Amino acid sequence: MHLDDIKEIIPAQLHDALAKDGITELRPAQEKAIEAGLLSGQNLLICTPTASGKTLIAELAGMKSILENKGRTIYIVPLVALASEKVKHFRKRYGTMCRIALSVGDFDSADPHLANYDLIVCTAEKLDSLLRHHAPWLGTVSTIIVDEIHLLNDVSRGPTLEILLTMLRRVLPKVQIVSLSATIGNPQALADWLGAELVIDNWRPTELRKGVFYDDRISFPK
């Protein structure tokens, strides 16, 4: 699938920004996500290898929603460092067409200034805090991206993320949730819990090979 194949169903600004960055052809997982309803508001669970294009899947859903004035997008990441990395990327690509904020600190505030932003990148713990403080702008969120959703199984962070997603689905019943992961042991069960369509693909940009490193040499099985 080529980028121009979806030119008529995504905002022109979004198409032009991607084309400017040299994106002309969509990867297999991205094509599967679109066919599964990514651009029509369908909840999706994307389970594909690292570097297979999951972030662009999230961008397509989130930026389409923002540019069509349907609502804000929240991008949930597990680590502050990753949040900063995502914000830097988003500002470079979309900084002229929407307002982008990083929100990771001060768990005792509703952060009212976030009402002035369209794309908000935060950790699960921060969003949990915003929800508990009844941030009024949360009612205008239309798309939620959950990066590294397999951390639901993490002993320390999993419970917060699970409760957060449960509450968000209750508070925002019409919100689109796009969840991303490279490693999920029970993807269909998780997709069912999320009320999402499951997208699985094994394509990766480079071949994955397993070998044994010994005495400064790597041996690969034949």
Image: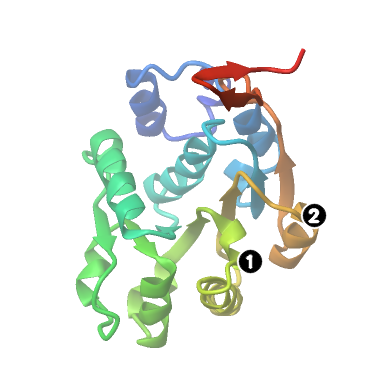
Quadrant in which the C terminus appears: top right
| Visible residue check, residue 27 | no
Q: Position of residue 158 (x, y in %)?
A: 57, 71
The CA span between labels 1 and 2 is 15 Å
Q: Residue furthest front?
A: 215
**Mark 2 residue type:** Gln
Can you tell which quarter of the image residue 108 is in?
Answer: bottom left
Q: Residues within 10 Å of mark 1 (few under 14, many from 20)?
A: some
Residue wearing tag 1: 153
Residue wearing tag 2: 188
Question: Which structural element holds mark 1?
Answer: helix
Count of labels in the image: 2
- Residue at 26 percent across and 59 percent down: it is 102
Q: Nearer the viewer, residue 139 or 179?
A: 179
- Residue at 53 percent across and 21 percent down: it is 215
Res 190 label: none
**Mark 1 residue type:** Asn
- Residue at 25 percent across and 68 percent down: it is 114
Q: Nearer the viewer, residue 68 or 155?
A: 155
Q: Residues within 10 Å of mark 2 (few under 14, many from 20)?
A: some
Q: Nearer the viewer, mark 1 or mark 2?
A: 1
Q: Does residue 53 appear to the left or right of 192 in the view shown?
A: left
Q: Position of residue 214 (x, y in %)?
A: 57, 24
Q: Does residue 125 appear to the left or right of 44 in the view shown?
A: left
Q: Position of residue 33 (x, y in %)?
A: 65, 38
Mark 1 vs 2: CB contact within 8 A: no
Instruction: Please report whichever mark, 1 or 2, sits nearer to the chain's N-terminal start.
Output: 1
Question: Which structural element holds mark 2?
Answer: helix
